[in-house]
Amino acid sequence: MSLKEKFYNSTKELKSAYSLCALAMLLALRIIVGIFANSTMALFGNMLKISINFLPIAIAAAMFGPIGAALIGDLGDILSFFINPSSGGAYFPGFTLNGILTGLILGIFLYKNNVTVKNVLISWTINAVLVEIFLSGYWLYFIYGAGSGTSFFVYLWTRVIGEGIKFIPSVLLILALGKAVGKIKVKNNKQ
């Protein structure tokens, strides 16, 4: 399936009541996970946060493609801030962009029952390097480090360490959940 077809089919998914209900539940899960299921590693100050908030985005990517997953990434970041603004400081749109990009990247590789080891590794690596390491590192440097004299490379290497810690658990969780929801979606479409 071409990239254009993936985006077209993913957009068509939004017309189904089943899809909208499932996306709403995944959005609620993303908000809950964004508020409660994360931890800041004390060793690195406020630079390294470990979270599983990518899981609802990955599930949406496997089930509904890049558009549905980007919506979960976008709205999940915005709504979790407005529901619980004390959880992570002031709202910053850069992290919303990260959520959108994560949804797009995972959706491109995992949509239409394409949750294979190869696709999960490729999508996770692209997302980890471009979004989680470089963009998140830059956003953190922009917010905290630019005026304090802390080098951008400190933020960059902290992000590399964090992604290294998350690599195996993240890939295994995406594989397991992606395969499971792929079967659910296929079974539901046959009924």
Image (cartoon, rainbow, N blue to C red):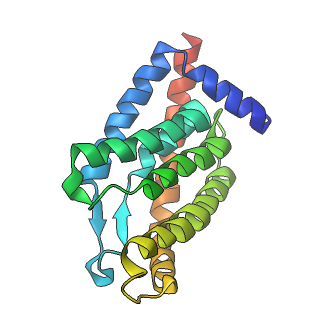
Q: Quadrant of residue 122?
A: bottom right
| Horizontal arrangement in the rendering, residue 107 relative to residue 1 (left or right) | left
In the rendered image, the vertical position of residue 35 relative to residue 160, given as above or below: above
Residue 160 horizontal/vertical position (percent): 51, 76
- The residue under the point 51% across, 49% down is 174
24 over 151 or under it: above or below: above
Using the rendered image of the protein, determine whether residue 179 is visible from the camera's viewpoint: no
Residue occupying the point 56% across, 64% down: 128
Front in this rendered view, residue 51 or 98: 98
Give the quarter of the figure containing the C terminus: top right
Q: Is residue 113 above or below residue 74?
A: above
Q: Which residue lies at the image location 54% right of the left edge and 66% below the top edge?
A: 135
Total count of labels: 0
* Position of residue 55 measured from the top left corner of the image (x, y, whole percent): 43, 47
Residue 136 shows in this picture: yes
Seen as rendered, the residue at the extreme right is 2
Q: Nearer the viewer, residue 54 or 152?
A: 152
Give the quarter of the image for residue 7. top right
Instruction: Work out which quarter of the rendered image holds the N terminus and state it.
Output: top right
Residue 51, x across and y down, in percent = 36, 59
Q: Is residue 3 left or right of residue 23?
A: right
Camera-side residue: 12 or 164? Answer: 12
In the image, what residue occupies the spot 51% across and 64% down?
132
